[in-house]
Image (spheres, rainbow, N blue to C red):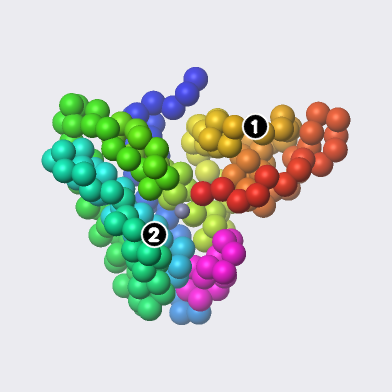
Amino acid sequence: MGRSFEDARRWMQEGTKAFLDAIGLLHGDDWDAPSGLPSWTRRHLVAHIAANADAVGNLVHWAATGEETPMYSSPEARAEGIEKGTRMSGGELLAWVRDSAEKLEAGMAGLTVDQWQTTVVTAQGRTVPATETPWMRDREIWVHLVDLATSTAFADLPEDFLEALRADVADKRGEVPEVFGTLADVTAYLAGRPYDNVALANGEPAPDLGPWL
Ligand code: ZN
């Protein structure tokens, strides 16, 4: 098993559509309601998703041109992008998510096979081939769709995506306890998100792993 590049590109397109559909249903005060992330309203979260498309787009630009363009010019610039979004209307945020996603999609669609192999550096300082960027975007768009705290739960995400996410988070975290539960619950648990029922082999509750992503 393991995810393929084609899987990652498909999840990106499906995730973008699901995210746009979800925020298209928000009205008025809905935007100021808390998200699933500490101290962030939905405005912060949605701005982060739009800014993330621009940031991943910088890596695509790097791959296309060879010019080193980091995701964010600095941690402050990342925070500023999110802060800027909190002053936008719902309509403006929706447009930013849609336009940034379209631009990212067009950028990726334009990369040649060779350009996809370009080595880029992520905001976490990981050195990866550009082929890793669709998966970076997948994680953001799907996990934060759940964090929007609308009606989407981990159990609603595509099963093959959840399998890939479970494997990736376990890998990135390194040492994780072996736990049992549904695929959605175990993945939510590993991702540091709320879950219903996850237990250790001896039936004891699983220890809290803390936040991720
Ligand atoms: Zn994020």
N-terminal label among 2 and 1? 2
> Dots 2 and 1: beta carbons under 8 Å?
no
Toward which corner of the image does residue 111 lie, by quadrant?
top left
Task: Give the residue type at disc 1.
Answer: Glu
Side of 26 where 205 appears, left or right: right
Q: Nearer the viewer, mark 2 or mark 1?
A: 2
Residue 77 image offset from top left, x and y in percent: 34, 63
Tell me: residue 88, above or below residue 178.
below
Q: Name the mark on residue 75.
A: 2
Task: Give the residue type at disc 2.
Answer: Pro
Q: Is residue 37 magenta?
A: yes
Q: Is residue 64 visible?
A: no
The magenta-colored residue range is 31-42
Q: Is residue 146 magenta?
A: no
Residue found 60% across the figure and 51% down from its top? 211
Q: Nearer the viewer, residue 78 or 161?
A: 78
Q: Is residue 74 visible?
A: yes
Callout 2: helix, strand or loop? helix
Question: How many residues crowd around disc 2 within 10 Å: few (fewer than 14), some, or many (20 or more)?
Answer: few
Residue found 35% across the figure and 35% down from its top? 127
Q: Nearer the viewer, residue 125 or 135?
A: 125
Residue furthest to the left in view is 65
- Count the labels in the image: 2
Tell me: residue 99, above or below residue 169.
below
Tell me: residue 92, above or below residue 48.
below
In the image, the residue with mark 1 has its CB under 8 Å from the nearest atom of ligand 1: no
Secondary structure mainly formed by the magenta segment:
loop
Question: Which residue matches tag 1?
Answer: 175
Residue 33 image offset from top left, x and y in percent: 55, 73
Q: Nearer the viewer, residue 157 or 59?
A: 59
Toward which corner of the image does residue 92 lie, by quadrant?
bottom left
